[in-house]
């Protein structure tokens, strides 16, 4: 069957639009800027100490590092806690988020001091996107069944924490992390980002291939959608602890500290 000129033109335009959409985040991102400041944000079931393996490596490279203590109350309050730390930085800053805090990185990353974004097995929603609905289009990860609520306060049960969150860590170390777990408020999960910094900032993503907290294929989807420079690490959800060297090197690359 012959295609009319109008149909052909429409198909050609649609194909061109699709190509532009697939490349838009990379095309929009400015050149990488060398940064000496790194701001790290933790996610659910954790506190700022979860970066303890990455921080000394970054400091050894001569970088100024700050770990945000995410209040885990509401998304606006969590974003505000990161913004306060970003406002204290004295120049270009790489903003790094693990797990849930990818929501914070996506929103707070619009701060003009942020030169690049790094997502470590992290959520990476678009502006206004329902992340829960997006996640449901992929198989549910095992850790989800281990969340325990005491009223509006949630935490991960010990068995799920050791098996599905920190599965590639020595049990003794995983139990220490479990003991320092900071509960989160249910209201936090209802938050939606209003902006998507990855559409205009250079972005990097570390996929955890053995992740049982966020589906690895969902991580791959989000990384590809944002046009991020992506690495895959054979790790649990806690690659920042079990594979700190790989995560550090990705952050250094985002900071323009690697050639």
Image: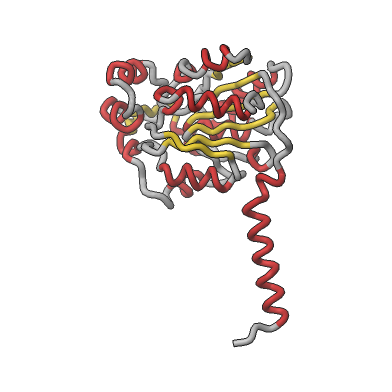
In-front residue for pair 208/81? 208
Among the 4 quarters of the image, the one containing residue 179: top left
Please state the horizontal and vertical placement of residue 250, each as a whole percent of the image.
Answer: 55, 29
Q: Which residue appears at 36% of the width and 37% of the height?
A: 210
Q: Answer with the quarter of the image where residue 234 lies.
A: top left
- Label tally: 0
| Residue at the farthest front position | 259
Say which quarter of the image contains residue 19: bottom right
State the scheme by which the image is colored: secondary structure
x, y percentage for residue 82? 60, 23
Q: 12 and 81: which one is in front?
A: 12
Relative to residue 29, is residue 152 drawn left or right?
Answer: left
Residue farthest along the left direction in this orientation: 159
Q: Quarter of the image for the N terminus: give it.
A: bottom right
Figure quadrant of the C terminus: top right
| Vertical arrangement, residue 204 with respect to residue 252, above or below | below
Residue 91 placed where, x, y %?
73, 20
**Quick check: 50 above or below 147?**
above
* Residue 150 visible somewhere in the drawing: no
Q: Residue, x 46% and y 17% (percent of image)?
A: 53
Is residue 141 left or right of 18 when viewed as pictured? Answer: left
> What residue appears at the point 57 percent right and 26 percent down from the top-left corner?
251
Residue at point 65%, 40% (across, down): 195
Residue 137 visible = yes
Q: In the shown orientation, is residue 133 left or right of residue 199?
A: left
- Residue 113 pos. (x, y %): 71, 25
Of residues 147 and 43, which is closer to you in this image?
A: 43
The residue lying toward the viewer, choosing from 191 and 170, is: 170
């Amino acid at each position: 069957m012959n295609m009319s000129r109008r149909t052909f033109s429409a198909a050609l335009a649609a194909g061109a639009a699709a190509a532009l959409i697939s490349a838009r985040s990379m095309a929009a991102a400015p050149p990488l800027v060398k940064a000496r400041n790194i701001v790290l944000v933790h996610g659910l079931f954790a506190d700022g100490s979860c970066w303890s393996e990455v921080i000394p490596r970054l400091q050894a490279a001569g970088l100024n590092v700050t770990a945000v203590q995410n209040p885990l109350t509401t998304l606006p309050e969590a974003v505000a806690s990161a913004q306060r730390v970003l406002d204290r930085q004295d120049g270009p800053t790489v903003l790094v988020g693990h797990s849930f805090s990818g929501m914070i990185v996506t929103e707070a990353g619009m701060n003009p001091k942020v030169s690049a974004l790094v997502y470590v097995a992290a959520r990476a929603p678009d502006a206004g996107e329902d992340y829960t609905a997006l996640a449901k289009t992929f198989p549910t990860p095992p850790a989800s069944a281990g969340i325990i609520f005491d009223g509006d306060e949630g935490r991960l049960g010990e068995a799920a924490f050791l098996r599905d969150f920190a599965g590639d860590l020595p049990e003794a170390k995983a139990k220490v992390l479990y003991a320092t777990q900071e509960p989160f408020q249910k209201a936090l999960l209802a938050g939606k980002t209003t902006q998507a910094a990855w559409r205009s900032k250079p972005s990097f993503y570390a996929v955890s291939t053995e992740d049982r907290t966020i589906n690895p294929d969902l991580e791959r989807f989000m990384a590809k959608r944002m046009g991020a420079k992506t690495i895959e690490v054979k790790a649990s959800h806690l690659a920042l602890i079990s594979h700190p060297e790989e995560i550090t090197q990705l952050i250094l690359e985002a900071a323009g500290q690697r050639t």
